[in-house]
Image: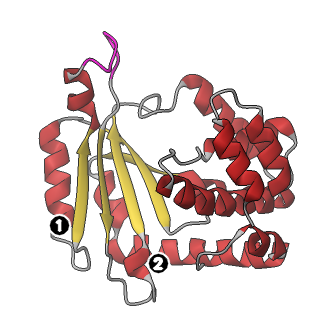
Amino acid sequence: METIGKSEIEKLTDSQILDFEKQLQLDSDKILEHFNLMRLLSRYGTPHIKGGKEMGVMWAKDIDIKVIAKDLSIDRWIQLCSELLKIKGVRKIFPINYRDYDREVNWLSEGNKGFGYLVSINNLNVPDVSDSRMWNIEMSLVEDDGVFGQSEEGRRATKDWKEKLTETSRVTIIRLKMFIAEASKKLKEMGFNKIDSLLVYDAVFNNNVSSIDDFIKYYETKEQNQQKVYTFLKLMK
């Protein structure tokens, strides 16, 4: 979907949003099947689809996959990166060593299993998906499901959200994600950090937010949010 403003996002009907999400699901399935990616990742551990695709609230051309690794090591990660580059239709990969670097700079407490190894691929070439070059697939190799930014509390919250998800809340979440994506682009130009998409789930499931204006009011209640950002959101058209 092309860049649109707040008023255009608000005018989108529920059926338009659900049709848009459905097409993203279909295209993402075609991409995964084309590269036989889940089969490849299963050689390194147990792959799990995460993020918007798992929840049924896709709004961007992104696929998140977490792999619970059988043998987590930098050599295995490098091997995966090498295999990905050999796949026809993959032009570029982007690896990040969160695990060893974060330990080296003491970002991890003693005994913490660390985050993990991440690699993303983009600039894809999938004949059956017209805009496949716009897609990004992000894969993280971790020791267990409790690392890489998802605590036990976080896992419980995700499970709770999935159980609460309805067609109405799906539409609200996708609409809000569209809004914060557009807002974050402009905020970045102003020197601010992007808005955390996890706030959308908290807003909808824990604070009964059902519209963009409701979300802006909810955002004001967060102590860490600068007043300038809140004012900017209120003025978005």
Which mark is first along the chain, 1 or 2?
A: 2
Instruction: Give the structural element (helix, strand or loop) at label 1.
Output: helix
Which quadrant is home to the N terminus? bottom right
Nearest the viewer among 217 and 177 is 217
Left or right side of 150 for 122: left
Q: Is residue 127 above or below residue 82?
A: below
Q: Position of residue 153 (x, y in %)?
A: 61, 24
Is 196 one of the magenta-colored residues?
no
Examine the structure image and report whether residue 107 is included in the region drawn in magenta.
yes
Q: Residues within 10 Å of mark 2 (few under 14, many from 20)?
A: some
Which span of residues is magenta-colored? 106-113
Q: What amino acid type is highlighted by mark number 2?
A: Lys
**Residue 22 visible at all:** yes
Q: Which quarter of the rendered picture does the C terminus lie within?
A: bottom right
Q: Is residue 57 visible?
A: no
Residue that carries the numbered disc 2 in the rendered image: 30
Q: Position of residue 138 (x, y in %)?
A: 38, 56
Residue 85: numbered disc: 1
Determine which of the numbered discs, if any, sits on residue 74 in the image.
none
Up/down of 1 relative to 108, above or below: below
